[in-house]
Amino acid sequence: MKAQPDLSVTLAARKRRWADFYAGKPDARFMVLAGYADASVPPRPWPNPEGKQARLEWAWAAYTRDLRRAAELEDDFIPYLDPFTGTEIFAEAFGCTVHRPADNMPFALPFVTTPAEADRVRVPELSVSPLAILFDIADELRRRAGPAAVMRLVDTQSPMDIVALIWDKTGLYTAMLEEPEAVKHLAARVHTLFVAFLDEWFRRYGREFIAHFPYYYLPQGLTLSEDEVGAVSSDMFCEFFLPELQALSDRYGGLGIHCCANARHQWDNFKQIRNLRMLNICQPPDVTKAAYGAFAGVCGQHHGFWDATVPPWEWPKALPLGTRMVIQVEGRNRSEAAKILAKVCRACG
């Protein structure tokens, strides 16, 4: 019987491939993630404070499943601990009321409507803010799994996107034109809490992590959602968004961006960000197809393929030259996932 390789050795090799992918090495143009349905983990609970223990137990069951999956499929997947959250976490820390539906994700309700109200917002102390529960959950997961386990990052938006949760948008966009310094001052306070949280997070759990969305591995850096840029001009992007994105990329050693806004007019601005590691856009097929060409040679891309009728083992040859892509495939069961994975890996060379 063929001996199974030690999983730690397997995962170390996969991490090296991810590093080569980000470095742009020609033999690591494609990273492949394969999954299949697994009923062993119950449905994920909603991320509400009173459900802390349920969140812990769900995350632990998911990690146990992921360890098994990593041993079964020879793809580039890295198991991770998942202290999952909603988008509300930083806005709540600044004072937003959070609406928590019984059957959906929580979300923050804005409480700032004017520049004067924005000026009264203060940076909370991290250890006594609602963010503290996230460290409680992550600490317990790491205690169970050990120091080698990789943590998924919480749901992070850019500081300006967090401002757009705190400040009602009907007034925010007007203020960006008429009183821009008030907006920048609030964004600076959000930035202060944001980096305080991230500095502590990476100090406790290490610099490597799984992105907040979609779920790819980064040896270092930061990932965040950047959605408000779809509603502003290119000049406003450069004034309000680009400086903070560049500062965060420089501070943490790279940036991965998720954007589900209609923001094609910002693509050239995204390219200005030093050390842009990964881009994920959620847009119609024609826009997705254009993105692969626009960002070929710029960064890794994790958008999905633009034509659902094309099987995944044909995707590599359809991509523009120089494209680095994360290919994600799913099977109905482990056997089907393994067969699809084998075909994709052969196509990737």
Image (cartoon, helix red, strand yellow):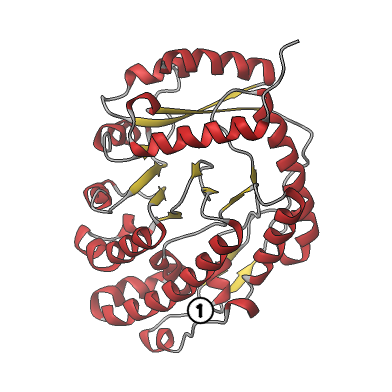
Quadrant position of residue 318 = top left
The residue lying at 54 percent from left, 42 percent from top is: 215
Residue 96 lies, with reference to residue 204, above or below; the image says below
Which quarter of the rendered picture does the N terminus lie within?
top right
Which quarter of the rendered picture does the C terminus lie within?
top left
Q: From where the camera sits, is residue 96 visible? A: no
Amino acid found under the numbered disc labelled 1: Phe
Tell which residue pokes out farthest to the top in this image.
Answer: 1
Task: Tell whether 323 sits left or right of 1.
Answer: left
Task: Tell whether 276 sits left or right of 55.
Answer: left
Task: State how many labels appear.
Answer: 1
Tell which residue pokes out farthest to the left in this image.
Answer: 235
The residue lying at 27 percent from left, 40 percent from top is: 298
Please name whichever residue, 106 or 336, is drawn nearer the observer in this view of the structure: 336
Please name whichever residue, 162 or 168, is drawn nearer the observer in this view of the structure: 162
Residue 168 lies, with reference to residue 276, above or below; the image says below
Residue 349 lies, with reference to residue 327, above or below; the image says above
Report x, y in % for residue 254. 38, 52
Report x, y in % for residue 38. 73, 30
Quadrant position of residue 184 = bottom left
Quadrant position of residue 237 = bottom left
Task: Tell whether 194 sits left or right of 103.
Answer: left
The residue lying at 65 percent from left, 47 percent from top is: 149
How would you rate the neighbour count of disc 1 (Cα within 10 Å): few for under 14, some for 14-19, many for 20 or more?
Answer: some
Label 1: element kind: loop
Report x, y in % for residue 101. 68, 60
Report x, y in % for residue 152. 59, 50
Q: From where the camera sits, is residue 163 visible? A: yes
Label 1 sits on residue? 111
